[in-house]
Image (cartoon, grey):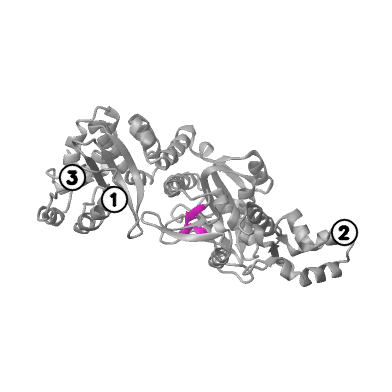
Amino acid sequence: MNTSIPTILKRLGPSLTSDVIAEMVKSGLSPTAARQRVTRSQPEYIRLAGIRFSKNARFIYLPEQFGTRDYWEGLERAFYKAGKSYWGAFVALRSRGGACPANLFPTISGVPQSRKGQLSPDRIKERLSAIQLIKETNDEVLGAYVEFVPLVLGKANTNKIQALLIAENVALFGIKEWARRIGFGSFGKFALRGDDTPPVVASMTWDLSAPSYFRPLLRVTEGKVRPGFMVCDINLCDVVGKDAVEAFVRKCDLASALPSIPPIMPILVGQVFSEEGFSFAKQKGILAVTTKSLFGEAISKALDDLIKLMTDTGATVAMNPAHLEKVMKGLTAIEGAANNIRGSLFEFVVGSLVKDVEDGYLKIAEKKLHPQSGRYAEIDVYLDRGNEKGVLVVECKSKLANARVGLEEVQKWYSDRVPLIYNILSSDGTYNDKHFRFEIWSNGPFNDDALQWLETQPLKFPHYSFGWRDGAQLKTYADKAKASSLRKILNEHYFHHPLIRRQRKKEGNVATTPP
C-alpha cells in the first residue's frame, strides 16, 4: 500500500497527523518510522496554524483541499476526536442554523468562563475566527452576531436569528413560571438570558438558572443546607439532533466536574428532538423537553408559527391576519412574555393593517443595504400602493402603558433613517416617478417636545413627505380595516390592554391616547 502523505490525505481527506500515522502503521511501518515520515514530509502538506489538538496532533491537508466540504468535515472529525471544546461550539452553532448573537456565544460554546486548564468562550471564538471558520458581523437590529464563514456550512438568516431570539425568550418566561409554580427553583432567584445578572452556574453560562431545594439536589455541609441548581438551555431552531444533545451533555459534565460544585439538574428544551437525540439525552440523565410537553400543543404551535412569520418577513401575516391574532393570543398567555411579543409584532400588525386598508405590495421588517455607505437599514413596513398613491414607509414604535415617543426618536427617524431609506429605495430605479410618504406610528402618545419639533420641520419635498400617527390616530385608521381580527388585535393588545387603561386613568388624559 502506498504510504505517502498525499496519497493518504487524498484517501482519508484532511486529517489529524495521528490518523495519518495510524494508516501508515496499518501498512507495516513502525510507529516511530511513521512519525518520522510525517515530520520529514512537511513540504507535501499544510498544517493548520493556531489550533493544537490533544497529544500534540496537528490537522493537515493538501493545498487543493483547503476550504472544500471535505476540509470542513475533516476538521469537524478532528475536533470531535481531539478538540472537544472546539467541537462543542461548532455543533452548537450549526444546530442553531449557523449563527447566533455574539452575547449568546458563551452559552452555546459550552465551556467555563474562567477555569484553569480550560479554554474560555472568548479564546475559542478567537481561534475559530483565526482559522476562518467563524466571524463576527454587525447588524443594525441584532447588533453583533457570530456566523459561519464557509458557505458549505450554511448562510445566516438574520430574520430567523431575530425570530428565534424572540420565541426562545418567550418560552424562557414560560419555563420560569412553570418552575416557580412547582417549586423546582427558588421563587425569586431565577436568572434568565439577557438579565443584568446572567445565569451563571459553575462558571458556565446558561439560558436559565435557579437555586433548587429539591431533596435530591440538597447537600448539607458543616451543618448548613446548600441548594443545588436547575439549569436550562433552549434551542428552537429546527430539530435538535444527537450531536447538539451530546454537546449539551459535555457542557453539563464540565459544570459538574469540580467537587465543590453542588448538584445540578440540567434541562434541554427544543421544539422537536430527533429520536436518536432524545434517546441519548435520556441515557445520559438529561431532561430533554419539548415546548409541546411543557406548554401544550396550542402554545407550542404558536411559538413555531411566530418563528415562521418573522422569518418570511410577514408574507403569511398579510395574507391571513386571523392567523396573527391566534399567534398573539397564544403567546401573550405566557406570563412575563406579553410585552416582549407586543413590541416585536407591532410592525407585523401595522403591515397587515395598511395592506388591508390600502392594498398594494407589502414588505415587513426587510433589511436593505445602502451600497455607497455600506450601511444597512431595517424598513419596518413599506407598501407600494401603485403609481398614483406611491410608496408608504412606516416606522413602528410600540410603547408600553407609561412610555411615549420621545424627541430623540423622532429626530433620528427624520434626520437619519428617512434619508437613508429613501436613498436605498430610490437608487435602483424600481420606484421611479413614485412619491414616497414616510410616517412614524405608535400605539401611544408622542411627547410634547417631539410633536413641537416635528411641526417646525419641513414636511413636504418634491419626491417625498412626512407624517405621523399617535395611538388615537392609529385607532381611527384601524376602524377602516375590513379584517375584524386586526381591530381585535389592536384593541386587546395595544389599545385596551389593562396596563394601558390603568395608565390612562392615572394620567386623566384621553386626548392623545386611544379611547
Residue 75, quarter of picture: bottom right
Which residue position is annotated with label 1? 427
Disc 2 crowd, CA 10 A, few/some/many (<14, 14-19, 20+): few
Q: Which residues are magenta?
A: 99-105
Q: Amino acid at mark 3?
A: Asp
SS under mark 2: loop
Residue 419, quarter of picture: bottom left
Which residue position is annotated with label 3? 470
Q: Amino acid at mark 1?
A: Ser
| Dots 1, 2 in contact, CB < 8 A | no
In which quadrant is the N terminus drawn? bottom right
Q: Nearer the viewer, residue 99 or 369?
A: 369
Q: Position of residue 514 (x, y in %)?
A: 18, 40
Q: What separation in Å lies between label 3 and label 2 (alpha carbons)?
A: 79 Å
Is residue 165 visible in this depiction of the protein? yes
Q: Nearer the viewer, residue 373 or 399?
A: 373
* Residue beneath the point at 62% across and 54% down: 68
Q: Position of residue 28 (x, y in %)?
A: 90, 61
Was residue 407 drawn as part of the magenta stretch in this picture?
no
Disc nearer the start of the sequence (1/2): 2
Q: Amino acid at mark 2?
A: Ser
Which residue position is annotated with label 2? 27
